[in-house]
Amino acid sequence: MAMRFPFPKEMLRFPFQKRKREEVMAGKVENLTHAAERQAMSVLIDGLLKTIKNSDDRTETYLKIVDIAAKFYGKGAAADKLDAVRAAIKDPNNRWFKYINRIIDETDPHYAKMMLLNLGYEAFLRGTKTIRANREKYGCNIPWLILFDPTMACNMHCVGCWSGTYGHKSNLSFEDMDKIVSEGKDLGAYLYMMTGGEPTVRMNDIFRLAEKHNDCFFALYSNSTLITDAMCERVKELGNITFMLSIEGTPDTNDARRGEGHYAAVMKAMDLLKKHGIVFGTSICYTRANIEAVTSDDFFHMLEEKGARFGFYFHLMPVGNNAAPELMPTVEQREYMIKRIREVRGKDSDICFYPMDFQNDGEFVGGCIAGGRNYFHINSNGDAEPCVFIHFSNTNIHDNTILEMLQSPLFMAYHEGQPFNRNHLRPCPMLENPQLLRQIVEATGAHQTNLESPESVDHLCEKCDAYSKEWAPVADKIWAEQSHKRPAYENYTEEKKEHPELAAFEHADGTEHIDL
């Protein structure tokens, strides 16, 4: 017998409908508030840039910017760090404010405004607050940036490049890319990086994406060869795209891995970007063969004069069946790399270029940033991978939302496991702790994502086993000789924050210890 209700069925739907309407209204209010705040920030940035451009002494304007940022962050602002920034601003000899002045003076005004509005306000200020709230709300990693591959197509065949094994036929559709950015923004991510393949192969779709999402900032890892004057004009007009150009030292060391004529193509691209007032950086893979060439004073000064203002350094990873493990830096070279990058960033350096070392700067970002802790990777087949170097997945953009990806077993294993080592010179679950990646893949049932040239987790990690054992005692010695301040914000699970010993692993001498 059917159950009878003493009141109309429509009344049953009313509470749900009311809640739904309230949610919709709350969303609309939030959007209006965001739009008004962005417009106010746009006007403010316009005024600040004009003041800076027309002022001989920019100190007061920079101090005002710091005060604005502190007010926006509220309780989340670190008072000691803000005070340090203020002190640096007041120092007329501070190299980093000379560096900032140079960027402002050489950058197209519209491009500078959009970079500050999207990268500064949306990503660093508003986005960071949203991300931190959502990490608490959803109990998983929420990334500050998302890296994805528009295509695997590439016009080059660099020695040791893992991407070449993926084949050149897979692509994300425009709708896929739009979904990634739209859902990422809902979670607080306003910075998007693209690799591949060569992303500029899909430049028309990228322009379309950047125009639609004109509140985001897009950074493309590029081999430089397809960058043209017309492309730079459009980039300058949009104001929310930059490039990280691949280069590896001298013409000889560069072209030995990347092919004859590539160095000249990079030089041409740099000249074009500088001419148009576009801020850009470099992407540098350091290997056993080129490490001295990519860290020499002459190299840094060349990048500086060409207009590059920042650079990402990447330790060669033995990823893929066509990998060249023999090109991995030696232990001695890696130790040198740690010292050299810090020297170039030091207060006494005269180099107007800011290098970042993906593998050796773990101390400043709390170790491994992958698995959505600060970033993750979506390949051109749509597979969500914890890292651009970890080609395993159990979720796909065609079947899942960004949030569902971040809550998948593989990504939650990263969330629960980070930091993978309290010595942040040994951050990676593959390169320095390969036993952990084996465990993660086995426990989560993740599958490898290279359809053209499959590589098992054992095959990958076997190439890292000897390296990790050799590097461990050297890394432990360096770490023990340095002083380390525990960061105020780590983005670990509560258990890992309260019990740091849970992230301790056996060191080369057989002991277990924590250095905080």
Image: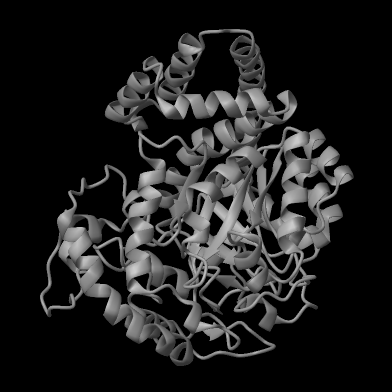
Model colouring = one colour
* Residue in the picture at 62% in, 38% down: 305
Q: Nearer the viewer, residue 100 or 377?
A: 100
Quadrant into which the N terminus falls: bottom right
Q: Nearer the viewer, residue 210 or 511?
A: 511
Give residue 331's position: percent from left, percent from top.
33, 72
Give residue 367's position: percent from left, percent from top.
34, 59
The answer to whether residue 5 is seen in the rendering is no
> Does residue 511 lie above or below 148 as drawn?
below
* Residue in the picture at 38% in, 64% down: 415
> Does residue 444 lie above or below 223 as drawn?
below
Give residue 298's position: percent from left, percent from top.
53, 48
Q: Quadrant of residue 241?
A: top right
* Residue in the picture at 63% in, 54% down: 193
Q: Residue furthest right?
A: 230
Give residue 369's position: percent from left, percent from top.
43, 59
Q: Quadrant of residue 393?
A: bottom right
From the viewer's perspective, tell me whether residue 245 is left or right of residue 234: left
Q: Nearer the viewer, residue 419 or 348?
A: 348
From the viewer's perspective, tell me whether residue 102 is left or right of residue 128: right
The answer to whether residue 55 is seen in the rendering is yes
* Residue in the picture at 46% in, 12% down: 59
